[in-house]
Image: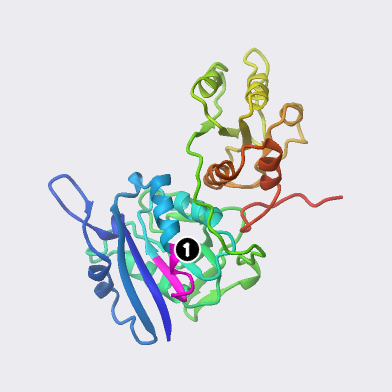
Amino acid sequence: MKRILFLSTGGTIACKESDEGLIPVLTGEELLPYLGDLSGDLEIDCEDLLNLDSSNIQPEEWQIIAHRIYKAVGEYDGIVMSHGTDTMAYTASALSFMLPGLPIPVLITGAQLPLTHVLSDGINNIRVAFTAACSSLKGVYIAFNRKIMLGSRCVKVRTMGFDAFESVNVQPVGIVDARGLHLDMESAIHSVQSFTIHDHLCKNVMLIKLIPGMNPEIFDILLNHQYEGVVIEAFGAGGINFIRRDLIAKLEQLVVHGISVVVCSQCLYENSDFSIYETGQKALKHGVIQGYDMTSEACITKLMVALGQTSDLNEIRRMFATSYVNEITLPKQP
C-alpha cells in the first residue's frame, strides 16, 4: 500500500464564493470527498500547509513548502500538492531546484474552476496527480488537464481554458487516454545528485522584458538598489539593441559590478542562440549567461537558488551550463 501526503496550499481549487469574490477556504480533508474513493490502495494523510491565492505565494512560501517536502521524504511514497494556477509554474520550478535529488514524486496540481463547481476540472487533475504520485517518478511535476509535465518546463498559457499549462520545448512526461496513464520514463527526471535542500534564496533578482526603445537607464536602478541577478527576455534568438540606446553596454556594467545577467528569449518555443547575430555575440563578449530554451520561470527561480548558494559569477555560469532536472537543452559539443 502506497502512503501519500496531500498538501493543500489554497488556490482556485479550494475556493468558495464570497462578497469579495472567490477566496480559498476548503481544507485538504474537505477537498478529498469530491474525488470519490481514492483509498483502495492508498493511505492518504492530509495537511493544510498554506491557504493562499497563489498570487501571494512567494519565495518565503517556497521555503515553507520545500522544508515540508524535505521532511516528508522517507515517510511517504509520494506527495500531491494543490496550488493556485497563477504562480504554479514558478513554485514547481523553484522546488525543482531547491530539492535536488528528490527521490519520490511530487505532483503539483490545481484547477481553473473551484472543486465545488459541478463542472470543475479539479477532480480529474487531482486524480491524475494521485495516480502519478504512486508511480516510480522522481522529482517535481505538474499534473494538469490529463498531462504530467516537468515542473521546470511548465508555463501557464491560458487564463480560463482547462488546458492552462504547456510543457515548453519538451513533451509531457505522461498523458492520460482511454487506456490510463502512460509515462515516458526516458523523459522523466533522472538526477544523479544526492538529495538535499537548498533553502537559501536570493530575492534580489529581477525579470525584464525588452521592448524597442527601452531607456538603458532602467538598468541603473538595479545597481542603485543592490540587485544581485537579472533575467533578460531578449528578442528572438537573443537580440539586444545597441544602436542609439545601448543596452549591451549597460549589461556589461551590471556584470562588472558582480550582477549575474541571464538572457533568454521572449519567444515561448525553441531556444535562444547568441552565436547567430552580431547583437548576441556582443552580449556574450560582455559576460551574459545564455538561458537557451529555459522558460523565464525556470531562469528566474534557478538564479534565485544559485545566488542563494554563491555569488561567484563563474560558478553561476557553470550552474546555468548544467541541466539538473531536464530544465535546459544544452548545445551538443563539437
Tag 1's secondary structure?
helix
* Quarter where residue 323 is shown: bottom right
Where is the N terminus found, in terms of image quarters? Answer: bottom left
Q: Amino acid at mark 1?
A: Tyr
Q: Is residue 136 left or right of residue 35?
A: right
Q: Give the camera-side residue of 219 and 98.
A: 98
Q: Is residue 182 left or right of residue 55?
A: right
User: Are there few (<14), some (14-19), or many (20+) residues within 10 Å of tag 1?
Assistant: some
Above or below residue 317? Residue 155 is below
Residue at left 65%, top 62%?
Answer: 193
Q: Give the camera-side residue of 67 and 1.
A: 67
Residue at left 56%, top 53%?
Answer: 97
Q: In this picture, which residue range is highlighted in magenta? A: 69-80
Residue at left 69%, top 51%?
Answer: 322
Q: Give the camera-side residue of 22 and 133.
A: 133
- 68 drawn magenta: no
Q: Is residue 239 left or right of residue 132?
A: right
Relative image position of residue 122 (x, y in whole percent): 33, 65
Relative image position of residue 136 (x, y in whole percent): 55, 76
Relative image position of residue 243 (x, y in whole percent): 68, 15
Q: Which residue is mark 1?
A: 70
Q: Is residue 195 left or right of residue 73?
A: right
Relative image position of residue 106 (x, y in whole percent): 47, 66
* Quarter where residue 279 is shown: top right
Would you say residue 237 is visible in this rendering? no
Residue at left 36%, top 47%?
Answer: 57
Above or below residue 60? Residue 48 is below
Q: Residue furthest right?
A: 334
